Image (cartoon, helix red, strand yellow):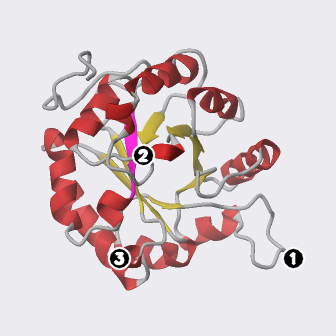
């Protein structure tokens, strides 16, 4: 057990370069779950927005490309794509351009998720193209060393997710708190990146507060909300320490 973690009731844990009093960032990745697809995605987004109004959090939703427009029309929360490709608009059938998701209402995008890995050269080009289109870029990394390498590509934010814990019952905050501390040291304390999120197995308020107490600025969550028959209840429980 990690004895250095802060109590779960703390609402605004400090971090190395986090803006004073900035709310923790919580990104819910809808993935391609049936409960988070099409009209179900719209309903889930509305529910997330209703819940978020009662908490001191910066909640953002990463939805499927086909759902961006309909979800963005229904909620004011920032909507992110789950992936974009590095191509410019034109003759690129089947690819997802940064401009297309921006036009659909997306404000940002995830990149290099463990379920959609990119080679380093492609990732660099895609980050550049996404930022060129005005998207906020959250680049995923599977280790502190990879996070440091990706940080050199100048994303807006890095999400640290050990792949072996994704979708599991134990969170990175509980199973491997030391890699959060290492990532903070390698990314936040020594580079220009000001935001580090952690994900993989995040399921409780304690997971969130522990991650923030170790220096992260927020968390990335997926199945515990997006594949849950009672997402409102579990989201309220997750955000309880940050109730207004």
Name the one closer to the observer, 72 or 197. Answer: 197
On residue 35, which mark appears?
3
Report which residue position mark 1 lands on. 91
Does dot 3 land on a helix, a strand or a loop?
A: helix
Query: Residue 157 sits in which quadrant?
Result: top right
Image coordinates for residue 243, horizontal then vertical, percent = 13, 44
Name the one closer to the observer, 125 or 7. Answer: 7
Give the quarter of the figure containing the C terminus: top left
Around disc 3, counting alpha carbons within 10 Å, would you say few (fewer than 14), some (14 to 19), or many (20 or more)?
A: some
What residue appears at the point 13 percent right and 31 percent down from the top-left corner? 9
Q: Which of marks 3 and 2 is nearer the N terminus?
A: 3
The answer to whether the residues at label 3 and label 2 have Cβ atoms under 8 Å apart is no
3 vs 2, front mark: 2
Image coordinates for residue 56, horizontal then vertical, percent = 22, 43
Q: Distance between the residues labelled 1 and 2?
A: 37 Å
Around disc 2, counting alpha carbons within 10 Å, would you say few (fewer than 14), some (14 to 19), or many (20 or more)?
A: many
Around disc 1, counting alpha carbons within 10 Å, would you say few (fewer than 14), some (14 to 19), or many (20 or more)?
A: few
The answer to whether residue 146 shows anywhere in this view is yes
Name the one closer to the observer, 78 or 183. Answer: 183
User: Which residues lie in the magenta part?
Assistant: 217-222
The answer to whether the residues at label 1 and label 2 have Cβ atoms under 8 Å apart is no
Does dot 1 land on a helix, a strand or a loop?
A: loop
On residue 200, which mark appears?
2
The answer to whether residue 55 shows anywhere in this view is no
**Residue 3 sits above or below residue 90 on the image:** above
Image coordinates for residue 37, horizontal then vertical, percent = 43, 78
What residue appears at the point 36 percent right and 60 percent down from the top-left corner? 223
Give the quarter of the figure containing the N terminus: top left
Query: Residue 233 sits in which quadrant?
Result: bottom left
1 vs 3, front mark: 3
Does dot 2 land on a helix, a strand or a loop?
A: loop
């Amino acid at each position: 057990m990690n004895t250095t973690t802060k109590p779960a009731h703390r609402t605004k844990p400090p971090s190395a370069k986090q803006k004073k009093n900035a709310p923790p960032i919580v990104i819910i990745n809808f993935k391609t779950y049936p409960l988070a697809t099409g009209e179900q995605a719209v309903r889930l987004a509305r529910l997330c927005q209703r819940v978020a109004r009662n908490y001191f959090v910066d909640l953002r939703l990463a939805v499927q490309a086909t759902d961006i427009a309909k979800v963005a029309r229904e909620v004011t929360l920032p909507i992110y794509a789950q992936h974009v490709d590095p191509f410019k608009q034109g003759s690129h059938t089947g690819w997802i351009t940064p401009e297309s998701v921006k036009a659909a209402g997306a404000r940002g995008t995830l990149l290099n998720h463990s379920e959609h890995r990119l080679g380093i050269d492609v990732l660099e080009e895609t980050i550049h193209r996404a930022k060129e289109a005005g998207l906020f870029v959250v680049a995923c990394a599977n280790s502190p060393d990879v996070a440091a390498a990706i940080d050199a590509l100048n994303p807006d934010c890095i999400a640290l997710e050990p792949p072996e814990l994704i979708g599991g019952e134990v969170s990175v905050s509980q199973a491997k708190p030391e890699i959060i501390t290492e990532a903070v040291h390698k990314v936040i304390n020594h580079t220009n990146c000001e935001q580090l999120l952690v994900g993989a197995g995040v399921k409780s308020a304690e997971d969130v507060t522990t991650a923030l107490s170790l220096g992260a600025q927020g968390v990335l969550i997926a199945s515990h909300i997006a594949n849950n028959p009672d997402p409102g209840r579990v989201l309220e429980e997750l955000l309880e320490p940050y109730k207004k």
